[in-house]
Amino acid sequence: MAYRNKCFTSFDGDNDIHYYRLLTAWHANDNFDFSFYDAHILTQARDSSSEETIKRSLKERLNNSKVFLLLIGKHTKNLFKYVRWEIETAMSMGIPIVAVNLNGKREMDIDFCPPILKTELALHIPFGQKIIDHALSNWPEKHSKLSAENEKGPFRYWDNFYTKLGL
């Protein structure tokens, strides 16, 4: 079994890659307290690779991940070839999911959330450095406890929690 210490990020590569790049920039910038141990640096698959080869590479990245970060934009729910497969695979592997609403919504966005995730135990948060950092550091343990109690459905932080974080 692989040592899981990475974050696997799933997103709409055509429309939302700049959000992913911002995550990596926050991690690289010493002025930000942001720990982002990116699973995508582990293996490379070229766009010209076969679907089977790409999914094998993605599975290897998931095997090394302790948390799954899903960036949810306008088109994410319609992406089945890879994004839905990544979500399904993460769920089957028991990897905690943090669903990040790129529109700033602090709870599950019923209009944009991929249908497969709507009833699953996942943390739904807005896109922002402090809240994502907190979620990446704390959701895996909280998810483990809630899973042990057979909790289901979307999870969110309440407004007073955001106030406590200064958001």
Image (tube, rainbow, N blue to C red):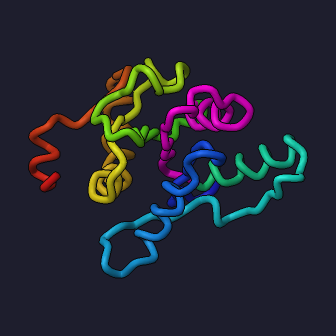
Residue 32 location (% of width, % of height): 32, 73
* Residue at 65% from the left image edge and 31% from the top image edge: 79
Residue 98 location (% of width, % of height): 42, 41
User: Which residue reaches farthest bottom?
Assistant: 30
Q: Is residue 144 visible?
A: no
Q: Nearer the viewer, residue 46 or 121?
A: 46
Q: Quadrant of residue 80?
A: top right
Q: Quadrant of residue 41?
A: bottom right
Residue 80 belongs to magenta span: yes
Q: Is residue 87 visible?
A: yes
Q: Is residue 69 left or right of residue 76?
A: left
Residue 140 belongs to magenta span: no
Q: Nearer the viewer, residue 28 or 87?
A: 28
Residue 62 location (% of width, % of height): 63, 48
* Residue at 88% from the left image edge and 51% from the top image edge: 49
Residue 91 location (% of width, % of height): 55, 32
Establish if 87 lies above or below 12: above
Q: Which residues are magenta?
A: 65-91
Q: Nearer the viewer, residue 26 or 153?
A: 26
